[in-house]
Image (spheres, rainbow, N blue to C red):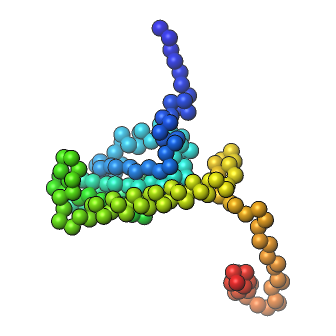
Amino acid sequence: TEIYTLSLHDALPISILDADGFVIVSTEYNCGIPPALSNMMDHFPPASFRHRPCGLVIYSMGHSGGARVLTLLRIFVAEFGMYPLPTHVVIPLVHEVLTEDGADTSQSGRFRVNVEKQAYELEWLADAILNQKKISKPTEHGFVFKSYDDPVKVKSKETPAGSDSKEHSNNRYQNELK
């Protein structure tokens, strides 16, 4: 019998490494993140997800639609280095809103509108990040998002005697912005 060992990097699915962004679809599990989701993501190094947008779609059979887990997931994905999108999809009473084949039966059509809005934001942010990566320099810690070859140097003025240094500092900052 042969025993094969793989490093975590070798076992990492190419689809995760090649993804420009992610959409996590989750339910609420005992007021928190489902352990299976957390466990699966914890198997991969955070760098596998870093600098990628992440849409969140939350559903439940209750009236809140899993709002508590949405709050937790936004923090959770940020810790992996992903950028949670401002638009999220919350589906309360999922068994009444969606059919088995995924058709939206709600009167308002809010589900479809939010999905389309989130898809647009995901694509927009993924494109922006990819464009930034093209002009950024990779480092051992990931990408440094600076494209400036020569940073602007600002001449500092001495703080006049007897003046409030904080006020002077704020004025100097405002002048630098002009």
Does residue 11 appear left or right of residue 116 in this picture? Answer: right
Q: Position of residue 73 (x, y in %)?
A: 40, 54
The outermost residue toward the top is 1
Q: Using the image as rendered, state which of residue 70 and residue 152 is in the foreground.
A: 152
Q: Position of residue 170 (x, y in %)?
A: 69, 83
Which residue is at a point 37% across and 63% down the rendered structure image? 117
Residue 89 in view of the camera: yes
The outermost residue toward the bottom is 162
Q: Using the image as rendered, state which of residue 165 and residue 97 is in the foreground.
A: 97
Q: Total of numbered circles in the picture?
A: 0
Does residue 70 appear left or right of residue 165 in this picture? Answer: left
For the C terminus, which image quadrant?
Answer: bottom right
Q: Position of residue 26 (x, y in %)?
A: 33, 49
Does residue 163 appear left or right of residue 126 in this picture? Answer: right
Residue 149 sits above or below residue 38 on the image: below
Residue 75 in view of the camera: no
Q: Position of residue 42 (x, y in %)?
A: 47, 40
Residue 147 sits above or below residue 47 on the image: below
Q: Using the image as rendered, state which of residue 14 and residue 12 is in the foreground.
A: 14
Which residue is at a point 55% across and 33% down the rendered structure image? 9
Which residue is at a point 49% across and 45% down the rendered structure image? 19
Which residue is at a point 79% across and 76% down the rendered structure image? 154
